[in-house]
Image (cartoon, helix red, strand yellow):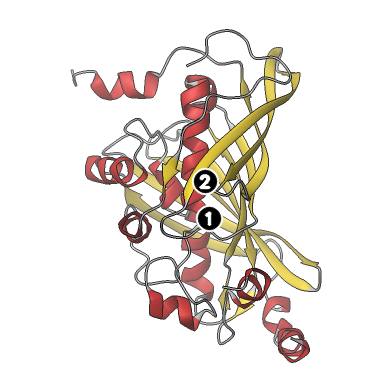
């Protein structure tokens, strides 16, 4: 995680994430069981006018979320804001790379606020989602994990 | 294509019938350790803070009221994150139709959900930008046509 304050033009440290069929299916069942749909079932996808299943938009959101968590720590998790549009379908086997570039440093409540352009691109370099995000300057703390590790009194 | 657009216009009465500000009610559930662990495994992120990303609060509450007449395939999300959910705590979600508009001849609905836990901690406010599609029309027909799916 970057500890130095970000500046305009800085690019976030990224990673690659492969979308698999199993992951697409399971994503529809964790936390909220949505049953069969165009993200998890080929017949449902066909009924929706598609020839193959597509990854859900929230699946891409999870990847961008990870990018911001890893680069901003608590500054993202406690107060992050994102606006993302899903612009191209993502399929099983696609490899997504989330990206973030600092566009502006503003101030909110007397503290610096990092404004970013964010997007995901696939293995062909095509953007699959795009938008903006903002958070405070990165911090080392990942206190949500530290709290989980703390023994219950 | 024109025929389908005509059908969409005809069926826009369904979209017309859903008012901005419409209360979509509330729901609650316990975010379990298992849910958090499963989410982290599925997304390949062992530190993921917000399993609620997969909970789709806005869509969840929208469909409890409108599943029989309207689909809202996901065109985007606007979200603010305040405090990660804590395992074992009950999450209370409320939602409403925050906005609706026509863009490029297509109707959209914006559904906003607010999630707090049982202690009153604000977890997230999430807005689903949904392409409003009457039940009975292929929900992803536009996408299929655009991208040759």
**Residue beneath disc 2:** A61
B59 or A121, nearer to the observer? A121
B129 or A48, nearer to the observer? A48
The C terminus of chain A lies in quadrant: top left
Residue under the point 51% across and 72% down: B65
Task: State the image coordinates of residue B60 (x, y, percent, origin top left).
Answer: 46, 62
Residue under the point 48% across and 20% down: A74
In the image, is residue B79 above or below residue B24? above
Classify residue B70 as left or right of residue A150. Answer: right
Task: State the image coordinates of residue A64 (x, y, percent, origin top left).
Answer: 53, 39
Residue under the point 57% across and 30% down: A80
Q: Secondary structure at mark 2?
A: helix
Question: Are both tags, 2 and 1, on one chain?
Answer: yes
Q: Residues within 10 Å of mark 1 (few under 14, many from 20)?
A: many
Where residue A110 sits, quadrant-wise, is top right
- Quick check: marks 2 and 1 in contact, CB under 8 Å? yes
Say which mark, if any, is on residue A57.
1
A16 or B96, nearer to the observer? A16
Between the C-alphas of marks 2 and 1, the distance is 6 Å
List the single residue furthest toward the top: A4
A77 or A115, nearer to the observer? A115
Where residue B100 sits, quadrant-wise, is bottom right
In the image, is residue B97 above or below residue B127? below
Task: State the image coordinates of residue B82 (x, y, percent, origin top left).
Answer: 52, 31
Q: Secondary structure at mark 1?
A: helix
Q: Chain of mark 2?
A: A
């Amino acid at each position: 995680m970057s500890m130095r304050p970000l500046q305009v033009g800085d690019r976030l440290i990224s990673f690659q994430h492969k979308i698999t069929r199993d992951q697409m299916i399971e994503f529809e069942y964790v936390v909220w069981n949505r049953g069969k749909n165009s993200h998890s079932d080929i017949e449902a996808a066909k009924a929706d006018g598609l020839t193959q299943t597509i990854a859900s938009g929230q699946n891409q959101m999870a990847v961008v979320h990870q990018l911001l968590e890893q680069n901003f720590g608590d500054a993202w998790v406690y107060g992050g804001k994102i606006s993302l549009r899903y612009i191209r379908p993502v399929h099983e086997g696609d490899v997504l790379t989330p990206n973030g570039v600092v566009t502006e440093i503003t101030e909110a409540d007397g503290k610096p606020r990092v404004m970013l352009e964010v997007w995901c691109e696939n293995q062909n370099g095509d953007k699959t989602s795009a938008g903006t995000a903002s958070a405070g300057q990165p911090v080392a703390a990942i206190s949500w994990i530290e709290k989980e590790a703390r023994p219950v009194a | 294509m024109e025929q389908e657009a005509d059908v969409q216009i005809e069926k826009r009465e369904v979209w017309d019938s859903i008012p901005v500000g419409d209360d979509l009610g509330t729901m609650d559930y316990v975010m379990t350790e298992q849910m958090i662990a499963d989410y982290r495994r599925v997304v390949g992120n062992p530190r993921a803070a917000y399993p609620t990303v997969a909970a789709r609060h806005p869509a969840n509450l929208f469909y409890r009221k409108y599943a029989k007449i309207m689909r809202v395939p996901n065109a985007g999300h606007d979200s603010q994150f305040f405090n990660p959910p804590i395992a074992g705590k009950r999450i209370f979600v409320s939602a409403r139709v925050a906005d609706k508009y026509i863009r490029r001849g297509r109707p959209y609905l914006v559904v906003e959900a607010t999630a707090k836990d049982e202690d009153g901690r604000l977890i997230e406010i999430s807005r689903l930008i949904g392409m409003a599609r009457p039940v009975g029309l292929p929900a992803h027909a536009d996408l299929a046509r655009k991208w040759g799916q």
